[in-house]
Image: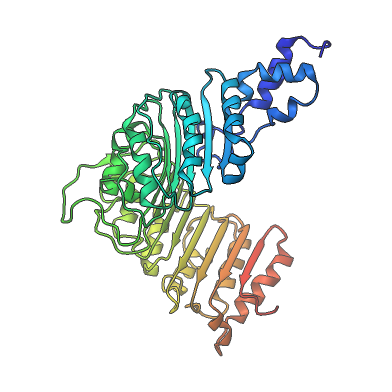
Amino acid sequence: MALLPPELWIKILDHVARPVGDVGESKDWPSHSAHWQRGSPLKLATVCRDWRKLVHNFPDMWNSLSYAISEHSFARGGPAGVRSWLARSGSRPLTLQFLCFCQDPLILNTFLEVFYPHFPRLAVLRVGLGGAIRGDILPIPRVDMPSCWFVDANFSNETYVAWFAPFFQNQLPGLRALQMREHTFTISHMPVERHIYKLTHLDAVVNNFNMRPVDLLRGCPHIVVCRLHFSFGHSNGTSGVTAFKPFTLAHLRTLWINVQYSYSWNDVFADATFPALEEMTLIGSMWPVPTFAPFLERSCCPLRHLSLQGCNASATEVIGILHAVTETLETFYLSGYDFSGLSSFNDALLDALDPQLQDVFVPYLRSLEISTCGSLQTMDGRFFDMVRARMTSTRTVALLHISLSCGLQELKKPSFHKLDFTGLANLVQQHPELTVELSPDPFA
């Protein structure tokens, strides 16, 4: 210890204590553990007496806590240990995660009594309650949290949603990342609308909001990453046709929408322009809607990744979508849930992708994934011919990844696509840079 001045040791410990990830440093979400995976101060404090003194007196070593509440942790004196840990963090902004795995409200409330006094300095809060608490939960305090920028709430039933809802009645001027992935069977409304204007990252089940998805997006002008999930049978807002004014999300780079079923809500893409969009995933049979290709053309966005999962569009509609982003698209994923086959994946689509038959089309495409629960709707060998043409063409970049997946009934057909599967498998030997995934494997 004497070989280095205390100021240098403080810098070393500060490096150890610094969180691994920050949503502001990445266009996508940090990992769930990004804010609490760091060197344990408890372990550092066991090195020697001088280390223990230095660590205990360095608040930044203690301003991040992830804790699992259970009968076992309670019996081992957990509340006292948590109180000491948080006390050492002083007045620093706090990253707090607590997960509850018990049913006794006395145990949970004992820990909440320790956590609640520190809520005014929350920076990151992640809460997860599983099981069923058999009794009343200590109410959320009404305090301002000026440093709170990231909230991640995950609840399994209505009781927990109702308990946490008052959290959003507090002042949260710094909130910019909100993750609310309650089970889609919860229907309670979280009063979060007044906080969404400054959000840059949103990952939520839409039933948390008392507004239509198009209004939700319109209310987030600074949004960079947005993921929207729809619960089964959920409907937002009022029905009927409503006239909207066009709106632009200038910063949105990643959009992920999961709409598995039919819903009564107005089209997100009819009036929107997303000029910075780079990645998009649409899940559900209602995609792509008729306004989708015009939306892409209007946005002129640098879309690099497009995933249409559970798609029921025709090949002509898919070709129109690809034409809208032909100069930028690098990865394309197309799948269907219908066991009758993926109708949009046919020879017309393959002809459009073949540089020997058509004008240059998505010339920078490097990854192509096709997945269907049914049989392939193309001529035997046609997919292989298209891939081989793109591997040798001077007008397109070579493909780096190919994935072809179909239902088991394909193997039982007399006209099984053996040429496609054998040809693609052999193509890897000629082009080592190419990876091919085939499912099912007829040669296994």
Point out residue 433 in the picture as x, y percentages from the top left corner: 70, 57
Please state if 145 lies on the left or on the right of 236 as rendered.
right
Judge whether 415 appears above or below 289 on screen. Answer: below
**Nearest to the observer: residue 127 or residue 36:** 127
Instruction: Please identify the quadrant where the N terminus is shown.
Output: top right
Point out residue 3 in the picture as x, y percentages from the top left corner: 84, 11
Residue placed farthest to the right in the image? 3
**Nearest to the observer: residue 331 or residue 126:** 126
**Total numbered badges shown on the rendered structure:** 0
Q: How is the image coloured?
A: rainbow
Point out residue 34 in the picture as x, y percentages from the top left corner: 59, 37
**Nearest to the observer: residue 399 or residue 338:** 338
Please state if 110 lies on the left or on the right of 284 as rendered.
right
Please state if 39 lies on the left or on the right of 163 as rendered.
right
Q: Report whether residue 233 is seen.
A: yes
Instruction: Please identify the quadrant where the C terminus is shown.
Output: bottom right
Judge whether 408 appears above or below 250 on screen. Answer: below
Please state if 66 lies on the left or on the right of 216 as rendered.
right
Rendered residue at 58%/38% (across/down): 67
Point out residue 170 in the picture as x, y percentages from the top left corner: 34, 29
Rendered residue at 53%/39% (across/down): 98
Q: Residue 367 falls in which quadrant of the image?
A: bottom right
Q: Residue 193 falls in which quadrant of the image?
A: top left
Q: Report whether residue 225 is seen.
A: no
**Nearest to the observer: residue 256 or residue 289:** 256
